[in-house]
Amino acid sequence: MTTKTQGLAAAAAPGEATLDRIAWIRLHAIHLPLATPISDAKVLTGRQRPMTEVAFLFAEIGTENGHEGIGFSYSKRAGGPGQFEHAKEIAPVLLGEDPSDIAKLWTKLCWAGASVGRSGLSTQAIAAFDIALWDLKAKRAGLPLAKLLGAHRDSVQCYNTSGGFLHTPIEEVLENSSKSLAAGISGIKIKVGQPDTAADLRRLTAVREHLGDDVPLMVDANQQWDRPTAQRMGRTMERFNLVWIEEPLDAYDVQGHAALARSLDTPVATGEMLASVGEHWELIKNEAADFIQPDAPRIGGITQFLKLATLADQAHLQLAPHFAMEIHLHLAAAYPHEPWVEHFDWLDPLFNEHLETRDGRMHVPSRPGLGFTLSDQATAWTRATAEFGKRA
Ligand SMILES: [Mg+2]
């Protein structure tokens, strides 16, 4: 028995099928500045300040045989440093493990921090590793992640969000929507949920008139309505033929969403704020949404997203993942029913590669894995790094 085999046994007692081992992990805390301070309804109701940056936790994982993967999680406003610190604590449990056993490794990472729970910040730290492991596996197979998972389509219809925030004057929102359509994006979403509901309706009327009847249009209230306001606004907005009304109520108001979804013709969308499959399961089993909007980094990564996608499919839900199009394009491509992907250009400066939009759809890149590498600019925005193990 060699020392190497004894080392393997000590790590996790893998069987003879083990092909490779995780040799090193590198973590980066990267703070991406936003060109303009961003406001949605949470700012207009006084709950939050305008957002000026997004904190990213990047995980790079490498193996003895020279395979590598990269994944990320993120935090808007507070929480980024906490995700990074939790990731530093749990990273060492991956060393020596077979990178292909992703489900097992998710569980191992979860148990490493069991006392801080199975949702929220701790799970979001795990997501960065989980996504890196899926990227690694797809790269090893020489396939884009969507192809490794088994795609239903090579492109996904996409809509723009970043042009329709509430800090943006309406003339500019209209201009942004035209630019999005010209850039091959088929849908437009605007923010609503202001304390002045008449102001919401004025903006929505202007956008619908500008776009005409045929362009898919969504609104997002970012949880700022109470139940009566959501009911009244939902009924008033029926005439705009919206693809969906997003987050009309508090993210955890399952019964309120269910009642609204039953009473409106316009589909109800929600789920971006939820932080585990278990929380999404409450929405699904209570028929609280027509569109479910999971966010892979927020619910613990791709392993968890795939479980959720199966549950959502069983419930005949439509899918519109939240943010992080670089990850969600692959996952949406693998969902049985035609989904929507949210187009945000905010992350573009972080990566050397960019996604292609054409004819209203976002196209799965032919590059293996997720298909992204960190840019020099991202390196310049790095606030902290941590390394574990040794590069081969
Ligand atoms: Mg939203």
Image (cartoon, rainbow, N blue to C red):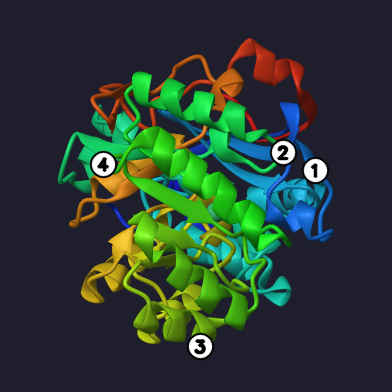
Q: Nearer the viewer, mark 1 or mark 4?
A: 4
Mark 4 touching mark 3, by CB under 8 A?
A: no
Q: Earlier in the sequence, mark 3 or mark 2?
A: 2
Q: Which of the 4 quarters of the picture holds residue 156?
A: top left
Q: Nearer the viewer, residue 386 or 390?
A: 386
Q: Nearer the viewer, mark 4 or mark 3?
A: 4
Residue 4 seen in this snapshot? no
Image height check: is 13 above or below 56? Answer: below
Q: Residue at x 45, y 80 (%)?
A: 260
- Quadrant holding ligand 1? bottom right
Tag 1 secondary structure? loop
Q: Amino acid at mark 4?
A: Asp
Q: CA distance from mark 3 to mark 1?
A: 30 Å
Q: Amino acid at mark 2?
A: His
**What residue does disc 3 label?**
255
Image height check: is 48 above or below 110? Answer: above
